[in-house]
């Protein structure tokens, strides 16, 4: 679904290019009024924290018409949220908080529904479209890392204006450690964006990830860090952690296919030996990092579970037995439905069959109690064409209640990240808040039309 640009959108801090790579013509859209204020303060004030405390008012009292706090099973009405600095100081009956905070600046959202800031646990800031298409090769071959980092800064802004106040960025696709640089720029207040949890380069064995060519005379750039052997697996983890990786990601499989009838299982080639995969996971855990595994086919999922990973990404080939293992071990599943549907749409055939297999597996895994967490794989589809919040809609279509879907992209996502200070609207949490006009429990697509965004007590989008 293509999303039209909203007049409330934050202004691009980088110019928007007209046309393709040539000619290089640019335009600068008008800057949103709330961002003008935020940017002015950023340039005048040295900032060290990811949430720029200096820009936040001393106290802000938010009047919420309806509150979905990300943890409770039912919404609340007539609620006030008192924000002090970058944290929520109190949540309670509006009349009570008004008596306690008589000097606070009031933000009246009494006609809106307030929620925690959304969390997308599978993004690619440094990628600008379908990774299975020719455009992927063009990005790695013809776009410099600095240019891709500029686009990544734009993408961080887009995520924030869509209401995503935190993301887990699962590899740079050949841009080395540029995600850590973007994270640093956001952390220091140089550019607006969500809280970023970076995984840097990711890993795959030699020959099992683009760019791959039949011309052996060419030395082509790699979309991941090539890793072969147990010792190199541990070394790669150490290198990535040393350069700022918050998470480690590896590719458990490649080349997907359905078995002959009556076998309806989606199979795959497993990339690493069990010893190699276990070395990656063991070294990451030893260094205090969790591990995400790209695993689409059932064979890749099984191999990743044998290695002891923390999250399964994509999982189109999830079977009932594999879902049972995830549920028993508390392993999270991040199905990235939006990208599956985006890729399947124009291609059909086996891609559509894979997406349908995932849809059926989703419903069964949900019944088994698998922790299904919202992740979109944005970057695998263009950041500027589809709103990440479309993923909520798919989850409801696939069997979740609207409240379950909201929790998957707020409190449960924060749990996956190991971040107890985000994902819930409660006292002591970071003041990461979004608001929508109507009731998302009646129409989940409301989450694709945010009217208000606050991150760390700073307002970036306002009605």
Image (tube, rainbow, N blue to C red):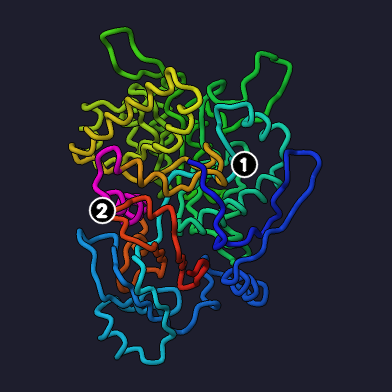
**Answer yes or no: do the residues labelled 2 and 1 have beta carbons within 8 Å?**
no
Q: Residue at x 53, y 69 (%)?
A: 49
Q: In this view, does 327 lie above or below 389?
A: above
Residue bounds of the magenta highlight = 396-417
Q: Is residue 377 above or below residue 57?
A: above
- Picture quadrant of residue 93: bottom left
Residue under numbered circle 2:
403
Q: Main secondary structure of the magenta part?
A: helix
Q: Distance between the residues labelled 2 and 1?
A: 38 Å
Q: Is residue 158 above or below residue 140?
A: below
* Position in image of residue 348 (x %, y %): 45, 21
Q: Earlier in the sequence, mark 2 or mark 1?
A: 1
* Position in image of residue 418 (x %, y %): 35, 54
Q: Which residue of the protein is positioned furthest toward the right in this rendering?
A: 23
- Picture quadrant of residue 110: bottom left
Task: Give the secondary structure at mark 1.
Answer: loop
Residue 275: in magenta span = no
Task: Give the secondary structure at mark 2.
Answer: helix
* Position in image of residue 185 (x %, y %): 61, 60
Q: Is residue 94 above or below residue 75?
A: below
Residue under numbered circle 1:
176
Q: Which mark is residue 5?
A: none
Front residue (pair 11, 291): 11
């Amino acid at each position: 679904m293509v999303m039209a640009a909203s007049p409330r959108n934050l202004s691009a801090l980088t110019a928007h290019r007209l046309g393709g790579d040539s000619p290089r013509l640019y335009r600068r859209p008008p800057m949103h009024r709330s961002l003008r204020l935020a940017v002015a303060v950023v340039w005048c004030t040295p900032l060290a924290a990811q949430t720029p405390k200096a820009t936040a008012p001393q106290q802000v009292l938010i009047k919420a018409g309806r509150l979905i706090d990300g943890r409770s099973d039912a919404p609340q009405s007539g609620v006030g949220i008192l924000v002090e600095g970058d944290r929520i100081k109190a949540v309670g009956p509006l009349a009570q908080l008004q008596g306690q905070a008589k000097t606070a600046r009031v933000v009246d959202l009494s006609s809106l529904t307030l929620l925690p800031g959304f969390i997308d646990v599978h993004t690619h800031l440094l990628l600008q479209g379908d990774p299975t298409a020719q455009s992927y090769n063009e990005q790695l071959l013809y776009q410099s890392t600095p240019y891709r980092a500029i686009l990544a800064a734009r993408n961080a802004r887009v995520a924030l204006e869509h209401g995503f106040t935190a993301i887990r960025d699962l590899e740079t696709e050949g841009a080395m450690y540029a995600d850590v640089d973007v994270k640093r720029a956001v952390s220091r207040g140089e550019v607006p964006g969500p809280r970023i949890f970076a995984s840097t380069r990711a890993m795959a064995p030699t020959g099992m990830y683009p760019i791959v060519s039949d011309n052996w005379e060419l030395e082509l750039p790699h979309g991941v860090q090539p890793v072969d052997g147990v010792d190199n697996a541990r070394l790669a983890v150490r290198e990535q952690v040393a350069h700022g990786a918050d998470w480690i990601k590896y590719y458990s499989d490649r080349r997907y296919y359905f078995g002959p009838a009556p076998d309806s299982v989606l199979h795959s080639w497993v990339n690493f030996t069990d010893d190699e995969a276990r070395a990656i996971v063991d070294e990451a855990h030893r260094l205090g990092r969790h591990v995400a595994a790209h695993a689409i086919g059932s064979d890749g999922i099984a191999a990743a579970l044998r290695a002891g990973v923390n999250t399964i990404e994509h999982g189109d080939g999830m079977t009932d037995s594999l879902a049972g293992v995830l549920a028993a071990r508390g392993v999270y599943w991040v199905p990235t439905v939006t990208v599956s549907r985006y890729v399947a749409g124009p291609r059909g055939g086996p891609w559509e069959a894979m997406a349908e297999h995932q849809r059926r597996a989703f419903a069964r895994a949900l019944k088994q109690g698998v922790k299904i967490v919202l992740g979109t794989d944005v970057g695998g589809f263009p950041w500027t064409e589809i709103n990440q919040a479309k993923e909520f809609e798919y989850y409801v279509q696939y069997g979740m209640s609207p409240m379950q879907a909201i929790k998957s992209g707020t409190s449960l996502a924060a749990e996956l990240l190991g971040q107890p200070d985000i994902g819930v609207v409660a006292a002591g949490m970071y003041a990461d808040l979004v608001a929508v006009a109507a009731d998302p429990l009646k129409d989940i697509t409301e989450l694709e039309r945010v009217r208000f965004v606050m991150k760390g007590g700073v307002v970036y989008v306002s009605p």
